[in-house]
Image: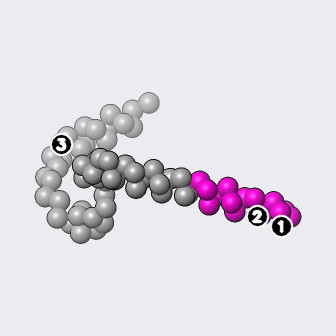
Amino acid sequence: MTDQARLRLFWKIGVYYGVCSVLVILAWLNWPELFGYLPFNGLDGLRSDTTVLDVETVKEQFVALNRP
C-alpha cells in the first residue's frame, strides 16, 4: 500500500467519523429524549436497573430461539 493510498484511506475514515459525530450531535440537540434509550450510563446504569426477570419466560424464549 502506497503512502498516497494510506492518506486517502485516512481521510475517508476521518470524514466518515466526522459525519457520524455531527449527526449524533444534531440528533442530541434536536431530540434529546431519544438518548434515554441509549446505554450512556455505563455499568452504573446497569447496576441500578431493578428489572426482575421471570426464569420461566427466559427459558421459553431460549428454547424457542434454539429450535431449528
CA distance separating discs 3 and 2: 55 Å
Q: Earlier in the sequence, mark 3 or mark 1?
A: 1
- Determine whether the residue tagged by mark 1 lies in a helix, strand or loop: helix
Residue 7's disc number: 2
Q: Position of residue 53 (x, y in %)?
A: 17, 49
| Number of numbered discs | 3
Do the residues bearing badges 3 and 2 touch, measured as CB atoms within 8 Å? no
Q: Position of residue 45 (x, y in %)?
A: 23, 64
Q: In which quarter of the image is the N terminus?
A: bottom right
Do the residues bearing badges 1 and 2 touch, measured as CB atoms within 8 Å? yes
Can residue 24 be seen at all in this image of the molecule? yes
Q: In this view, does 46 lie above or below 32?
A: below
Residue 56's disc number: 3
CA distance separating discs 3 and 1: 58 Å
CA distance separating discs 1 and 2: 6 Å
- Determine whether the residue tagged by mark 2 lies in a helix, strand or loop: helix
Q: Earlier in the sequence, mark 3 or mark 2?
A: 2
Q: At 28% across and 68% down in the image, what residue appears?
A: 43
Q: Quadrant of the C terminus?
A: top left
Q: At 31% across and 41% down in the image, what residue appears?
A: 62
